[in-house]
Structure formats: structure tokens, C-alpha cells
Image (tube, helix red, strand yellow):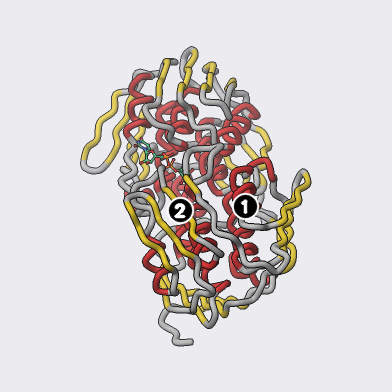
Amino acid sequence: MEKLIIKGNTPLNGEIKISGAKNAALPILAASLLSNAPIQISNIPHLQDVTTIVSLLGQMGVRITLDERSNIEVDASQLTSFHAPYELVRTMRASVLVLGPLLSRFGEAIVSLPGGCAIGTRPVDQHLKGMQAMGAEMSIENGYIKAKASRLRGANIVMDIVTVTGTENIMMAAVLAQGQTIIHNAAREPEVTDLANFLNTLGARVSGAGTSTIIIEGVNELGGGCYHVMPDRIETGTYLAAATITSGKIKLKNTRPDLLEAVLLKLAETGAVIDTGADWISLDMKGNRPRAVDISTAPYPAFPTDMQAQMMAVNAVAEGTGVITENVFENRFMHVQELQRMGANIALKGNSAICSGTDHLHGAPVMATDLRASASLVLAGLAAHGETSIDRIYHIDRGYECIEEKLAQLGARIHRIPSNTAE
Ligand code: UD1
């Protein structure tokens, strides 16, 4: 295991490139199971979660070649297994995304119930309900989802709650189904739209992605094609928050401001001066301390839960008091205890965190507990006086490509060492 050592209290300054979106790359790679022709995918980020899904697809007989420029060629013409074992699925909840494509293409799938970040109970009932409506027989036996269907048929599906991977799984299952599927109350996240665009590139007929009603006309087969994954809006937001918390000035390239309007508006409320172009965003705090903001998380286009922890770190050093309410996951405040160890004044009340900003945080040894919680500790460490060491950073490597290289490029004093090394 490794840890990150950060010597804080330095404003970030400079330019970096944003990577491809993890949450788009994962469903897109899973969707490649639907086609029996070669597919080229570019802008895939180098991340542990991508390695996990690539291993999972490899075990099923998918041939994957990767070049040094992050381009992947996937060939799922010769599949040997429709089984997703616990050992791989438990490390990443998004592995459940192979369920829809496997069931649709092979009429059968055995997929372990997922694990992933410990940020709530996170059931998959909506995924199962949608596939059942399409005629699949579903059961749960010994921790595995077992699904069977001769050929899925289109259905009218109303999601009880807005779920991102649930919408994606059903959309993928519907692509090769017989007839029309309509998903009502669908997730509107940009990653759902990116998946729909990818499927359409291969010959699928999906419309309405990005709205709450998605219509899929089933086709008999998908072909090959080339696709470029969208930029990572959460990575983008995390670096912008890092510049905000350190009173810095940065420019991010290869990104898209239209993907994170709610986040940009909140950052502007902290006092950040934000400028944007089609594929870049700059943020300048003009050397000022941020002002505290109130945030309420909800499905897209509202403020994303995946940026909640990072904004909690910003509020921890901000002027004034901010209230952050988490509405998507019931157990997503695990970073609070660690931020408190660094001197943050945060009181929890139900699903709200009331944070009164302090003049400065102080460095401390802390522990990463989940992906975005660990990002908030990195941000706090960048702003804190003294040295912060963050243990269990495998959580960060699941979702941030080359985080210490990118931060070092922006002037941060950060490096990685083995966990058992004293600094
Ligand atoms: C996806 C993202 C994750 C993000 C989350 C919310 C990926 C790979 N991950 O996760 O980064 O934090 O969206 O934006 O894209 N739920 C049910 N039943 C279900 C499915 C979900 O009750 O069948 C609940 C969950 O417990 C949660 C809420 O719905 O409270 C939203 O979860 P969901 O949108 O499904 O999150 P993920 O797709 O797992």
C-alpha cells in the first residue's frame, strides 16, 4: 500500500489537461460486449477501475489491446463466459454494468452482487426490475444475480428513483431487444448521453438521452466503430476546487464547461473568477480566501454528489458558515471525521453538514475512506499548514489519473511513498 505526503499552504498555479471520464469509460467498455465487430475507443483514462473492467471483460474472452496513447481496441466476437465473479466485482460496483449487455447478447448472465465504495447500501433493485419487465427471469442465489431470457423484448419502464448505472444497464439491455423500450424517470447525467452516443455509433437506435425519457428501438446486431470518451467533469471540478481552496489560479484543458454548470456557479459564489471556452476552464481566486457556500446534492443537472466532499474541504477553510446537504447517498460523510482531525469545524445533523470555516487547517495523518472522500483530503492537505499524509490512497487511484503528477505540475508539493515508510 502507498500513501501521499503533501506539504500544504501553496497556491496552485498553472495549466493541466483533464482525462477521459471514468464514469463514461466504464459503461462504454461494458457496452462493447454487445457487438461482435472490433471497436476503437480513445480518451480512456488510466485508472484502477478501468483496469478492473478490462480484466473482467478479458475473463469473458474479450480481446483488448491498448496502445501508449490511451486508445483501446476491443473485440468481443469470441466470448467464452457470461460469468462476472465476486473477486473482481467486489472491488468496483460499476462491474454490474456487464449484466445488461451479457443478458441481451447471450440470453444469460451470472454476475456477483456489487461492492465498491462504502457510501451507502446502494442496492441494484432498479436494474433487476427493468430487465424483468423486458422478460428476463432474475434470481439472487449465493450472492450472485442470475439472469435468463431467450430474447429480451421492449418494455415501458418507470424507474422508481433516478439511478445512473441502472439507466445505463437497462439502456444496454434494450439495444438488442425485440421492439421498443421506453425508460421513464431516466438519469440525465452526461455519462448516460455519452453511452447512448457510443451505442448509436455502433448502429443502435437510442434517442432522448440527456432527458428523463429515453427511447430505444431494438436492433438485431451492433457493428464496430470509433469513439472518443467525454472529459471527466468530476476530475475537472476537483482541480477547480483545489485552486479555490489554495487561493490559486489555474487553467484546465481538454474539458467541457457545459458539463458542470452547477459546480461552476457554486465556485463563482466562493469568489472565484471563472472564464471558459469550448474546451477549457480557467479559475482565479485573485489571492483571496474563498467564501463558504450552501450546497444540496441531487441528480444531474443539480449539484453532483461526487463533488460534495471536495466542496466540504473548501468550506472548511472558507470565510463564514456553509451547509452541505447530501440527498443521493445516505452514508457519504466519512471524510468529515478526517477533516476534523485537520482542524475543520463541522457539525453533522442528519444528512446535513454545517461547516464554519477556520483560518487555516493543519497537516495531520489521515485515512482515505472512499474515492471522493480521499480527494477532499488531498484538497485539505494542499491548503493546510504543515504536512499531511494520506493513507489507503488506492481509493484515489480508482478515479484520478496521475493525481500527484498533475498537482505537482500546478506547483503542489506532493509525493507518493510506500505506506510503511516514515517521512
Ligand atoms: C453513479 C456513479 C457515481 C455517482 C452516482 C450518483 C458510475 C460508475 N458511478 O453510481 O460516481 O456517485 O452515480 O451520481 O457512474 N439506488 C437504488 N436502487 C438501485 C440503484 C440505485 O436504491 O437499483 C439508489 C442508490 O442507493 C443511491 C441512488 O439510488 O441512493 C443513486 O444511485 P445511482 O445513481 O444508482 O449510483 P450509481 O449508478 O451506483
- The single residue placed furthest to the front in the displayed view is 320
Identified at 45% across, 65% down, the residue is 394
Instruction: Say what secondary structure mark 1 lies in.
Output: helix
Pinpoint residue 384: horizontal percent, then vertical percent: 54, 75
* Marks 2 & 1, CB-CB < 8 Å contact: no
Q: Residues within 10 Å of mark 2 (few under 14, many from 20)?
A: many
Q: Residue at x 65, y 47 (%)?
A: 231
| Mark 2 / mark 1, whichever is N-terminal | 1
The residue tagged with tag 2: helix, strand or loop?
strand
**Rendered-image quadrant of the N terminus:** bottom left
Q: Position of residue 13 (x, y in %)?
A: 72, 69
Q: CA distance from mark 2 to mark 1?
A: 14 Å
Q: Foreground: 196 or 253?
A: 253
Q: Which residue is mark 2?
A: 323
In percent of width and height, residue 255 lies at 69, 49
The residue positioned 21% from the left and 42% from the top of the image is 142
- Residue 81 visible, this orientation: yes
Q: Quick one: 93 or 121, which is closer to the camera?
A: 121
- Residue at 46%, 31% in the rendered image: 167
Against 148, residue 328 (above or below) is: below
Residue carrying label 1: 269
Amino acid type of the residue tagged 2 in the rendering: Val
Please tell me how crowded label 1 is: few (under 14), some (14-19), or many (20+) other residues with Cα within 10 Å.
some
Q: Is residue 87 above or below residue 338?
A: above
Q: Nearer the viewer, residue 261 or 105?
A: 261
The quarter of the picture showing ligand 1? top left
Q: Tell me residue 414's x, y (percent).
A: 59, 76
- The residue lying furthest to the top in this view is 179
